[in-house]
Amino acid sequence: MMDVFPYLVAGWVFLAGCYGLATSRNLIHAVGCLSVCQAATYVLLLTVGYRDGATAPVFSDLKPGSRPVVDPVVQALTLTDVVVGATVTALLLALVVQVAKRHGTVDPDELSELRG
């Protein structure tokens, strides 16, 4: 059970973010829900990269293959995911500020000018 628990947590966090996004009546809330969905990918990547009893991948004092090490590629992907998530959140919040300035509301239902 503990082997699949982190995957279940990642799925639950993602679904909670998707539910919040689907029921959101505020653009700022929608951006926050997208950030929650992004956090599920952090949990997923860390779960994939975890190895029980492994050490950091620094080989200065170890012989290669003497004991298990954590995959540094997954750590780099997680760090990249955090940076991209912060950038996308900042961009979306800047767009919400511009929508609020132009239309006077952050309710997506009241933005009738954007309908085609």
Image (cartoon, rainbow, N blue to C red):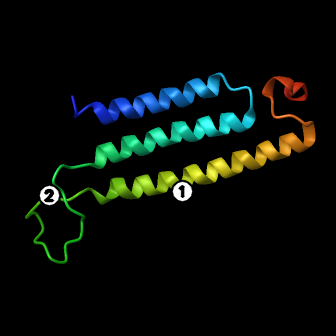
Residue at the limit of the structure toward the left, as seen here: 66
**Residue at 91% across / 36% down in the picture?**
103
Q: Quadrant of residue 44?
A: top left
**Residue 104 image point, x, y percent:** 91, 37
Give the spatial CA distance, label 1 vs label 2: 28 Å
Q: Which residue is more in the foreground, 16 or 82? A: 16
Q: How would you rate the neighbour count of disc 1 (Cα within 10 Å): few for under 14, some for 14-19, many for 20 or more?
A: few
38 relative to 51 in the view: left or right: right
Q: Quadrant of residue 5?
A: top left
Number of numbered discs: 2
Q: Amino acid at mark 2?
A: Pro
Q: How would you rate the neighbour count of disc 2 (Cα within 10 Å): few for under 14, some for 14-19, many for 20 or more?
A: some
Marks 1,2: beta carbons within 8 A: no
Q: Secondary structure at mark 1?
A: helix
Q: Amino acid at mark 1?
A: Val
The residue where tag 2 is placed is 68
**Residue at 64% across / 47% down in the picture?**
89
**Residue 7 image point, x, y percent:** 33, 33
**7 shown above or below 46:** above
**Residue 37 image point, x, y percent:** 52, 36
**Residue 102 image point, x, y percent:** 92, 41
64 relative to 3 in the view: left or right: left
* Mark with earlier residue (1, 2): 2
78 relative to 38 in the view: left or right: left
The residue where tag 1 is placed is 83
